[in-house]
């Protein structure tokens, strides 16, 4: 479905009206402006799809711009990861990526203009005094004792700040707006501060850096953005956005807020995600349990599944929490249609076919996909000794058992019907081997006398490929891990069973030809992908075949 044929939302309706009135001459310019202080997460995916999607829908342009005003927390690693994630999701920016730091000279000149117009002043209050003077939501703030300095004095000090004559935190430049404003963002906000720190793009040229709120609106103006789309937490910042642009008489993009993506059973705060990484609760930003785009990609999520998910949750003006099950449904739907099938035995138990010739081997041709003939076929070898999953055998079967049991028959996927005669146990009483018979007349047919109740997957022991399989699940076992839980932090709700590693899995040999990142449905087990980073045969579970969490939640109610 093209962007123009997709259903609209309140933002597309605003743009339609703007185009009808000729407000921006029919031009639509958007931007995706991440701060390079961490990896992008699923919430950013919604913003990426929205901003680039709007540009595509209205034949406009979307810039990728890094709002890099805080070099202490930023890095080139984050910049490269962001570019990689945007491209992987299927979007392109027409020009080179832009940086707020590209505009530092112009931003400094804008600050000088505000000083000369008496709209900004240098303040020497420390952080504690600043909080005291700021007031509260119920009480107005009070003017700084430095608020009435002359423009000439303010400009001289600001130039000294730029020259490095002040230490970090000693002085700041504040906009002069209204300390009694009911909107705290307008109570003389800081627009420049001193930071003696190396910047990843500008090096050591600057020791004064603009604040985000000052930078963001002016970067939009300098790029001729028409519609500055952001999340609802910036709604209270919009009056400051407008004040800066109106006071400096620049181009004036329209800021429009939408509800961010809140997903249950996860956290999307960059600070908390970084804490998970720094404290080794996960293996890195691309840990397959992380809600980062890199983590989702490594786990086996596809760009199409994430785009479809973002499309389905829609764009609204009110915050809500989206069920993780919707994201998992999106990837199941995509992989069910597009992932080839394969057989993998995760917890192997040996099966010896006592009546099968020792030196005989067969090759079965099976379909790669049951609903897609174009996916073709593959060859699966068969021999005297097989592996099946230990969960597919029960000495004392429960009701409605449809797998293998003593004296019971079951069909091997794509192969023969087998009957179990004997279960061999070790000293602890655990079944370690099954002795079975096969019926050579049952290949692809069900002769009279056999009523196998189920079909199980298997792998030829002689041809099996050893593999490591990571069973990933939700990282948190609490629906709202970052909510206010008295006496607990979000770390207390980490799911101890979010990662189980199986080191002795057995795979059919066709998977040796798989590529890193390639997805499969391991029949009857779930959807898996070959790990993007590991060179050996390592597969990650993307998602189960069914929503097991829905059953868990239902039991808890």
Image (tube, rainbow, N blue to C red):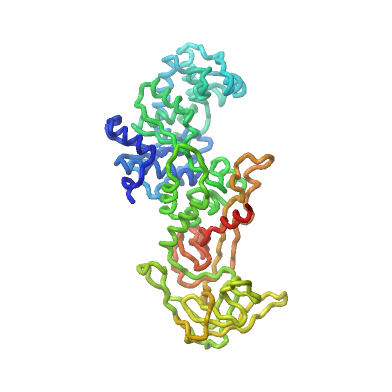
Foreground pick, 87 / 8: 8
Residue 274, placed above or below residue 504: above
Could you tell whether 506 is left or right of 370 in the image? right
Measured as percent of width and height from the top left, residue 283 is found at: 57, 52
Measured as percent of width and height from the top left, residue 522 is found at: 50, 66
Could you tell whether 378 is left or right of 434 in the image? left
Residue 122, placed above or below residue 203: above
Residue appearing at x 47%, y 82% in the figure: 446
Foreground pick, 380 / 148: 380
Measured as percent of width and height from the top left, residue 192 is found at: 49, 25
Residue 173 can be seen in this image = no
Q: Which image quarter: residue 15?
A: top left
Residue appearing at x 66%, y 75% in the figure: 396
Residue 364, placed above or below residue 226: below
Foreground pick, 455 / 512: 455
Residue appearing at x 50%, y 39% in the figure: 319
């Amino acid at each position: 479905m093209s962007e123009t044929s997709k259903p609209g939302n309140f933002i597309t309706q605003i743009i339609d009206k703007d185009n009808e009135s000729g407000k921006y001459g029919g031009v639509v310019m958007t931007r995706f402006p991440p701060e390079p202080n961490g990896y992008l997460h699923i919430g950013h995916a919604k913003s990426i799809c929205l901003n680039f999607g709007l540009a595509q829908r209205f034949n406009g342009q979307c810039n990728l711009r890094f709002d890099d005003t805080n070099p202490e927390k930023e890095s080139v690693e984050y910049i490269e990861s962001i570019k990689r994630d945007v491209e992987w999701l299927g979007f392109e920016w027409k020009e080179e990526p832009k940086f707020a730091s590209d505009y530092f000279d112009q931003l400094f000149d804008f600050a000088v203009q505000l000083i000369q117009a008496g709209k900004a002043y240098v303040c020497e209050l420390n952080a504690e005094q600043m909080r005291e003077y700021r007031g509260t939501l119920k009480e107005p703030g009070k003017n700084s004792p430095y608020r009435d300095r002359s423009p000439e004095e303010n400009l001289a000090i600001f130039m000294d700040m730029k020259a490095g004559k002040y230490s970090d935190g000693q002085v700041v430049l504040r906009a002069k707006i209204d300390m009694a404003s009911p909107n705290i963002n307008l109570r003389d906000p800081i627009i420049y501060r001193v930071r003696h720190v190396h910047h990843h793009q500008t090096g050591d040229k600057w020791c004064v850096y603009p604040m985000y709120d000052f930078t963001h609106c002016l970067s939009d103006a300098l790029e001729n953005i028409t519609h500055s789309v952001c999340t609802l937490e910036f709604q209270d910042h919009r009056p400051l956005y407008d004040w800066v642009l109106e006071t400096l008489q620049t181009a004036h993009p329209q800021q429009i807020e939408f509800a961010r993506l809140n997903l249950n059973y996860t956290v999307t705060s960059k600070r908390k995600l970084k804490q998970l990484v720094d404290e080794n609760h996960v293996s890195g930003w691309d840990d397959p349990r992380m809600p980062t785009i890199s983590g989702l990609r490594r786990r086996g999520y596809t760009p199409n599944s994430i785009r479809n998910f973002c499309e389905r949750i829609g764009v609204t003006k009110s915050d809500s929490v989206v069920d993780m099950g919707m994201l998992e449904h999106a990837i199941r739907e995509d992989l069910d249609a597009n992932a080839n099938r394969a057989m993998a035995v995760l917890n192997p138990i040996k099966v010896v076919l006592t009546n099968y010739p020792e030196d005989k081997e067969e090759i079965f041709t099976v379909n790669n996909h049951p609903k897609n003939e174009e996916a073709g076929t593959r060859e699966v070898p068969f021999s005297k000794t097989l592996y099946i999953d230990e969960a597919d055998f029960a000495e004392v079967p429960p009701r409605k058992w449809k797998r293998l049991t003593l004296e019971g028959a079951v069909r091997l996927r794509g192969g023969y019907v087998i009957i179990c005669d004997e279960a061999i146990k070790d000293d602890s009483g655990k079944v370690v081997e099954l002795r079975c018979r096969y019926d050579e007349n049952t290949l692809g047919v069900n002769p009279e006398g056999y009523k196998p109740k189920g079909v199980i997957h298997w792998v030829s022991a002689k041809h099996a490929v050893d593999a490591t399989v990571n069973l990933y699940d939700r990282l948190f076992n609490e629906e709202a891990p970052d909510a206010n839980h008295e006496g607990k932090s979000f770390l207390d709700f980490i799911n101890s069973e979010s990662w189980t590693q199986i080191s002795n899995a057995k795979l059919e040999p066709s998977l040796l030809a798989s590529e890193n990142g390639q997805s499969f449905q391991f029949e009857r087990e779930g959807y898996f992908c070959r790990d993007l980073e590991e060179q050996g045969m390592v597969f990650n579970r993307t998602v189960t075949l069914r929503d097991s969490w829905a059953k868990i939640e239902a039991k808890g109610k």
